[in-house]
Image: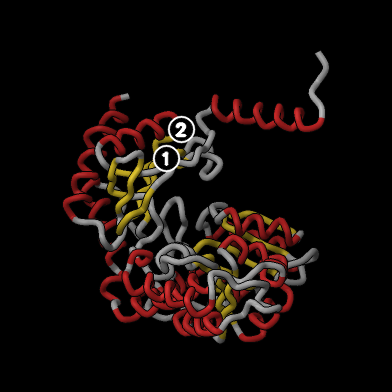
Amino acid sequence: MPSPKGAAALDAFAQGKLEELEAKSLRRRLTETDRFGPARARRKGKELISFCCNDYLNLSHRPEVKEAARDAIERYGAGSGASRLITGNHPLFGELEQRLARLKESDDCVIFGSGYLANLGIIPALARPGDLILADELSHACLLSGTKLSEAATHIFRHNDMAHLKELLAAHRAGHRHCLILTDGVFSMDGDLAPVEEMAEIAKAHDAWLMTDDAHGIGVVGGGKGSSFMSGRKADVPLQMGTLSKAIGSYGGYLCASQPVIDFLRTRARTFIYSTGLPPASAAAAIAALDYIEANPDYAVLPVKKAQAFTRRLGLPLAESPIVPIVLGDPDKTLAASQLLENEGYLVTAIRPPTVPDGTARLRFTFTAEHEEEEIARLADIIQDKIMEKRAAE
């Protein structure tokens, strides 16, 4: 029988890949989910307590944040209309960039359409062929994607292993014009923190530029300022990147840096130049969220406190961030554990390869300011009795 051609061949290719993924329990599907309130979701008519959302401060549901978004739509419309360099630079962008620069103690800031777009634009603008990039092995996918686009020589160092980073710098730094070191500030799947202060000192000693992706740090660690501020003062990090879609409760990406760097990226970052600006509502919501964080510092520490209560109850290492993983290893067992928790009234997503390395499929728990102590305690007890004890007996 002849092989299919044209569109039929495309369909056959896609179907074959889907069947391979299905056999490994790695196929992904979208599930309609109504986030109807802080830490609450509805699936198939069932109300669940959500422990899988990155809205750590529940600000996407704050009345004043939603009101700011509505007001922006009334004044500026639903969309920006064009690239910010054409006609899309409405006044809210400048205000938001000034607010973020002030929070992160930098000269200026530039806003992108998303965190992924930010890293796809920033890294290739700063690093080119002839340059060197060193990245933590657990860096977010968009950091690694931006690295590939740069075509710079790239080496991966072992997770949070500063000795290995130093070895790579000693072996390769002298042979390259510029050097960029990349890491998450808070690692999205493991919840641990990068040793940002130590990395900043290492980068400085080797004439390298440190860039941190603080998507999961801003708003919830370092007094709300993020992972560069864990010591109580700003570490020497020249490139502080992050998103507005987690604790800030809105959407978009940003980079806070020196004035020359920001001016350069507004001129050369392709994902900034050739993308329509954020909707006005997203910018206004982010400004209102930053207002709330600055006015309520005690509120910003709650997600980490609640994650730590969970880890204490289960006898796990003390949480460093709002993210706590329980690694089960096998995708089938992880999917089954996720379904068990859903049956008990909790929404906890099974995270499988390639999002995490092979053999490390996990339940990823995220804690928010609005989770109640009783909910956390009951969740921990169910995990201990029905998941961890079962696993230990196998």
**Observer-nearest residue: 151 or 111?**
111
Percent position of residue 309, x then y:
23, 55
Give the residue drawn at x 52%, y 74%.
Answer: 280
Compared with residue 21, is residue 346 higher up or lower down, i.e. above or below? below
Q: Residue furthest left?
A: 374
Amino acid carrying mark 1 in the image: Ala
For this view, does 335 lie left or right of residue 116? left
Residue type beneath disc 2: Pro
Q: Residues within 10 Å of mark 2 (few under 14, many from 20)?
A: many
Please identify the quarter of the rendering in which residue 336 is found: top left
Q: In which quarter of the image is the C terminus?
A: top left
Q: In this view, does 374 lie to the left or right of 182?
A: left
Circle 2/circle 1 CB separation < 8 Å: yes
In the rendered structure, find residue 350 and report the number of the disc placed on it.
1
> Callout 1: helix, strand or loop?
strand
x and y percentages locating residue 359 in the rendered image: 49, 35
- Pinpoint residue 261: horizontal percent, then vertical percent: 66, 80
Q: Which residue is drawn at 73% across and 58% down?
A: 149
User: Which residue in the rendered view is the most extreme toward the front?
Assistant: 74
Q: Is residue 63 left or right of residue 237?
A: left
Residue 353, compared with residue 187, is above or below; it is above
Query: In percent of the image, x 46 and y 73: which residue is there?
Result: 228
Reply above or below: 372 against 348.
Answer: below
Q: How far apart in space, not on screen, are marks 2 and 1 (Cα)?
A: 8 Å
Q: Residue 331 carries which label?
A: 2
Q: In this view, does 320 lie to the left or right of 78?
A: left
Q: Is residue 241 visible?
A: no
**Colour pattern:** secondary structure
Q: Where is residue 237 in the image (x, y as percent from the top left)?
A: 54, 76
Q: Nearer the viewer, residue 379 or 30?
A: 30
